[in-house]
Each structure stands twice: as structure tokens, then as C-alpha cells.
Image (tube, rainbow, N blue to C red):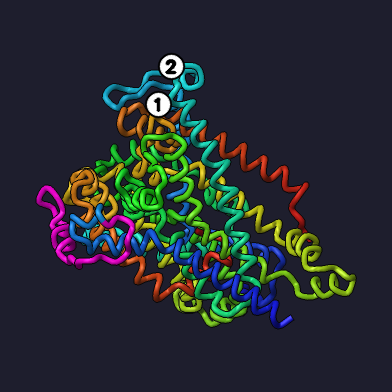
Amino acid sequence: MKSNQALEDGRVTPEFVENERKKRNRRESLTGYAMISPWLIGFFGLIIGPMIYSFILSFTDYDMLSAPQWIGVSNYVELFTNDPRFIKSLQATLTFVAIAIPLKLAFSLFLALLFNTGRKGSGMFTTIYYVPSIIGGSVAISVVWRQMFGRDGAVNTVLDAWGLNTISFFGNSTAAMSILIILIVWQFGAPMIIFLAGLRQIPQDLYEAASVDGAGTIRKFMKVTIPMLTPIIFFNLVMETINGFMTFTQAFLVTGGGPRDSTLFYAVYLYEVAFEFLNMGYASAMAWILLVIIGAFTLLIFKSSTFWVHYD
Amino acid sequence: MNQRTKLSDIIYYSFVIAFSFLMLYPILWMFGTSLKPETEVFANAASLIPVDWDWLNYPEGWEGFGGVGFDVFFRNSLFVTGSVVIGSLLSCSIVAYGFARIKFRFRKILFACLISTVLLPIQIILVPQYLLFQQLNWVNTFYPLIVPHFLGGTPFFIFLLIQFIRGIPRELDEAAIIDGCSRFGVFWRIVLPLLKPALVTVAIFAFMWSWDDFLTPLIYLNSVEIQTVSLGLRNFMDAEAGTSWGPLLAMSSLSLLPQFILFLFFQRYLVEGISTTGIK
């Protein structure tokens, strides 16, 4: 109606319609940009800009006192050829991820299957099992772990009472790594709930069809449940692996990276380099290597998914 | 058959209950030990229930260290967390509406950017962001903890809200626009009220994560008077250095209280939130 009024002779030319449409699209586009502007500012100002800056810094020597000095790839060379602590941190992180993440996923899948049998009270139990996921990253829980696994802590008291040898959890590399793994696996509640949601989405008629074909419980599990669940397993595997590589608070507070750097996780070492030694160029190089490592693992999981993830 | 079901029920329930106990043991132990007198902390290390109840650990821990008490840390945490929740709600909902409903140039590319940042490791921006905030003179202030959240700092929330808005019928928007409502009007008066359940989920997760956050306060908050509960607790631990576990565990328990209360009242939203989007 409005466009008709706009023309004096009352006719609408195609150009006019086209112009009006363009104008409206432009206005719509502007509104769109206005609405996403908070994120846009954050994306360029707090992520993309800093990432570019960090990439440049990774080729410099920068201690925050004097201007950054361009040193080429020296930081990267130094890291891989002349920094035993860096190699140790890589080893510690990879060991941790390789053990903790599969264990965590196995626990979460097993308990999700158990709760999916539809017995009474499963809602209450899933809630209880989910609690550690919420508070597991807190300083309070790290305090608890330090006391419980301390020399005279709760665990050693129990071991002693049972006539077993007490363990120096913070003096032994394997033991120190183990208590961190336990702390992470303990938080299996979140992936468990995602598995449960996935299990509930499997169409019941698939099971009925399998029954008609004479499949037993185990066969149904192997041929229906697991294939239908592979997209969820894939999702959880990607998320947990990425988070695993970034584990910081627990290692920083519970073991402090010790003993002898055996639990010096990548994120902990990066923090030390950046904010204790104020070696910003070196830390930036470490950050980019971490990004490449995480990217490579994610890509590997994505590539392998064609072989084991079932989509329909 | 009946006999077999009964037997499997017994096995199931005994396992699930025993395992619940194991899962909750560290938390119960923390509460229990926070009520033990110092002599009992080690003498009775593994027990959950104190022989002598000692509530004095709480007032003693509340005093904090170096003249700064936990009342200061709690006030700081409440301020930071409250601001983060408000910032996340405002910025993420309006950005999500823009992405979900409005056609603008480069929308597809920008949406891909948004999704790719969901999985971006925070370590990559830690150093340059610190240098940026240092240039702005924001180190040792609350700004680095709060401002990013007013700029859509958690892409996960935006993604969650976009998914939710896509489920709201477009006809509602269109009808309002024909009636002369502006885009902002549609967002504010029509979409936002319908978004309430998703906003509750966002608010709870924002609260939980901000309250828990340790790395950001550790990097930015140097003065004791502006530290949050998580950082204060860590420094309290270092100050006490294993000499007085009672007050330390009392403050640990208190530090988790807000999260427990929230979980108790809103667990449905949390469980729905993670099962639909897979956030932690």
C-alpha cells in the first residue's frame, strides 16, 4: 500500500519495487549487525585480534619490561630441542588424556546403560552422580583431594587400618597422576546425562524388529544400541578430549605439577611460563603448539568417524 | 522369571547405592571434617561424622587471613558472578536473535566463526588478552572478569539460544512486524518472554562457571581485597599450609554452598541444558 502511495500516478514500476526491496534489505541488514554487535566486538577485539597478536608474539622474545625482540622460530626450536620441562609436560598431558578420557567415557556409558533399564529411582541416582560434574573443577574440591590423599589423610588412614602399606600420593609420580585421573573420572556425570538422552532417542521399533528377527539381549545391544549411540560417543569424545588437554585447576592445586614435573600438565606449564616467568613470547609459541595439537586430535577423531560413527 | 528379576533388582540397587556413596564420599567427608576439632581431623581422618561437633571452624575460617575475611571474598564473588550472569543474558540473547531471525550479509560466515569459537581453547588468548587488559589498565580490577561476558563471551550460550529461538514460530515475529513493531520490539516483547526457560539455563550455567572460575581471577586479581572466593580459598590454603584443616574445609564447604542451593532448585534446567546441547 505504501509503495503505491509513493508513486504520483499510482502505478508501481519494477525499478521502484526493486529499490524498495533493496532499501528494506539494507535496513534489515543494519538491524542484524546492530543486534550481533556485542558479539562482533568481542569476536574481533577479544579473540581474533589477540590471536593474531599472539601469533606474532610467538616469534619474539618478550618479557614485558622491554619491547618484543624478533627472534624468528627460536621459541619453537627451543621448545622441542632444549626444554626438557616442555617435553615432560607433553608426556604428562598425553598420558593423562589417554587414560582419563576413555575411562571417563566408559564409566559414563556403563552407568547410562544401567539407568536406562527403567528401574525406579533412576532419576534420583542420575542427579546424585551428576553432582561431582558441577563442583569438580572448584578450588574446594582440590582442597579436599589434597587432604584426602595427604600423608595422614583419609585414604592412607583406611589403608593403614586394613593393614596395607600407606602411599605417598604426592611423592610418587604414578600415584600423583592416578589421583588426578580419579578426580577427572569422578566427574563422569555430564557425559552420562548426554548418553542417557541419546539412549532415550533410539526408536523402540528398532528393538522390536530385532526381536522379531530373533536377536537376543546381547545381539540387540551390539547391533542396535551401540551403532545408534555412536554419534553421541563421537560428540562426547571430542568434547572431553579438548577439555582434557586444557586441564588446569586440579593439577595446579592438587599436585602443583609434581613430583618432579610428572603431572606438569601443558596448561600448568604455560601458566608458569607466562605469568610466573613473564616469558610472553615463549608462552605464545606454547599456546599455538597446543592449538595445533588439539586441532590435530580433533581432526583425527573427525576423520576416523567415517569408520565407526553411524549416521542415518 | 520373577525370581530372576528380583535377583537382578537386588544386584542393581546394591551396586547403584554403594556407588552413590562412593561418589558422594568426598563431598560428605568435606562437610563432616569441617565440623571436626583439629585433634580429630587426623585421628579420625576417614570418618564422615565427627565424634565432637566443633562449629567453631566456621567463624575461625570466616576471619580469613592477613586481615581480610571471607565476607570480602563472598561479596566480590557475588558482584562478579551477578554481573557475569546479567551480561551473558543480555548480550547472548540479543546476538542469538540476530543470528536466528535476521538476514544480513556474511551471516553464514559469521555463524561459522561463532561455532568455531565454541571449541577454541582458552589458552590461545590468555597471554594476548592479558597484555590487552594491561594496556587498558584493567589488571587488578573486575573488568577482565566481567566485560567479556557483556560481549557474548560464551559462544555456547549464543548457540543454545539460537537453537531455542529456531523452535519459536516465525509467524509470531511477522505478525508483530506487520502490526508496526520494530525488530528490537519483537525481540524484547515477544521473543524474550518465550525464551525464559532457555534463559534460566544460561543464567544457571553462567553462575556456576563464573563462581567456580579460578584461572581468570588468578591471573588478574592481585590485591587480596578484590579476590573472589575461589582465589581467596586457594590463598587461605597456602597461608594455613596444612596446619588447620578444619577452618579450611569449613570455608571450602561454604564456597560450594551457592552452587548446591542452585543445583537443588534448578537441577531440571541443568540436566535439560546438557542433554539438549551437550554443555558441561
Report the chain holding disc 1: A
Camera-nearest residue between A254 and B216: A254
Could you say where residue A307 lies in the image, as x and y percent from the top left?
78, 47
Indicate the secondary structure of the residue bearing disc 1: helix
Question: On the image, numbered disc 1 is attached to which residue?
Answer: A281
x, y (%) of residue B62?
16, 60
What residue range appears in magenta? B44-69
Q: Position of residue A304 (x, y in %)?
A: 72, 43
Q: For the residue labelled by badge 2, is the local secondary structure a helix, a strand or a loop? A: loop
Q: Nearer the viewer, residue A280 or B91?
A: A280
**x, y percent for residue A108:** 58, 59
Q: Amino acid at mark 2?
A: Ile
Q: Locate the C terminus of chain A and report the quarter of the image it occupies.
A: bottom right
Quadrant of the rendering where the N terminus of chain A is positioned: bottom right
Please give left or right for residue B150 compared with residue A237 in the image: left
Q: Quadrant of residue B10?
A: bottom right
Chain letter for the residue marked with disc 2 in the picture: A
User: Tag 1 or tag 2, which sits nearer the N-term?
Assistant: 2
Q: What residue is at 54 percent from the left and 70 percent from the top?
A: B14
Q: Which numbered dot is residue B239?
A: none
Question: What residue do we see at 35% from left, 56% from top?
Answer: B212
Kindly report the secondary structure that dominates the magenta region of the rendered protein.
loop
> As displayed, is residue A269 above or below residue B31?
above
As shown in the figure, which amino acid type bears the numbered disc 1? Answer: Gly
- Graded by Cα atoms within 10 Å as few (under 14), some (14 to 19) or many (20 or more), the crowding at tag 1 reads many
Q: Could you tell me if the residues under marks 2 and 1 are in contact, i.e. CB atoms within 8 Å?
A: yes
**Residue A260 picture quarter:** top left
Residue placed under numbered mark 2 in the picture = A71
Is there any visible trace of residue A238 in the rendered image? Answer: yes
